[in-house]
Image: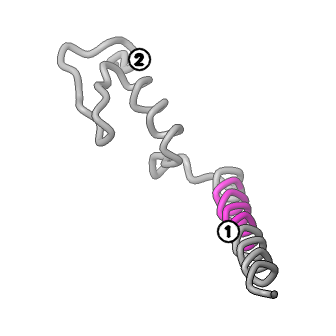
Amino acid sequence: MANFSRAWVDEVMLPDGTAASSAYDIDCWLKRSGWALAGDYSDDFRKNVRFRQQQARRQENFAALIHNYKRLIWNEK
């Protein structure tokens, strides 16, 4: 059985331009990017993804509310 946690001979270039020299580096990049391997899609992972999406939508809606409120105030004379 191979040891996948040790450093590789050749580095792999990741989509963000960083180099990965082990499977650990790729796992760290996947976590930073919000991605996961197909086997990692557990219920907790899906809940966290759903929570982050809901949180982003709430922030966008709140920002739009504030923007519209300020526009309403500034346009009233």
Disc number at residue 60?
A: 1
**Of 47 and 77, the residue lying toward us:** 77
Disc number at residue 44?
A: none
What secondary structure is found at the residue carrying circle 2?
loop
* Residue at image coords 30%, 19%: 21
**In this image, 74 relative to 50: left or right?**
right
Q: Which residues are magenta?
A: 48-61
Note whether 30 is above or below 61 in the view shown.
above
Closest to the camera, between mark 2 and mark 1, is: 1
In the rendered structure, which amino acid carries the disc numbered 2? Ser
Q: Which residue is mark 2?
A: 5
- Point out residue 61 in the picture as x, y percentages from the top left corner: 72, 73
Q: For mark 1, does the 10 Å Cα neighbourhood hold few (<14), some (14 to 19), or many (20 or more) residues?
A: few
* Residue at image coords 73%, 59%: 51
Note whether 52 is above or below 7 in the view shown.
below
The C terminus lies in which quarter of the figure?
Answer: bottom right
In the rendered structure, which amino acid carries the disc numbered 1? Glu
**Of 11 and 54, the residue lying toward us:** 54
* Residue at image coords 23%, 28%: 12
Q: Is residue 49 magenta?
A: yes
**Sequence-first disc among 2 and 1:** 2
- Judged from this view, the residue extending furthest toward the front is 77
- Judged from this view, the residue extending furthest toward the left is 10
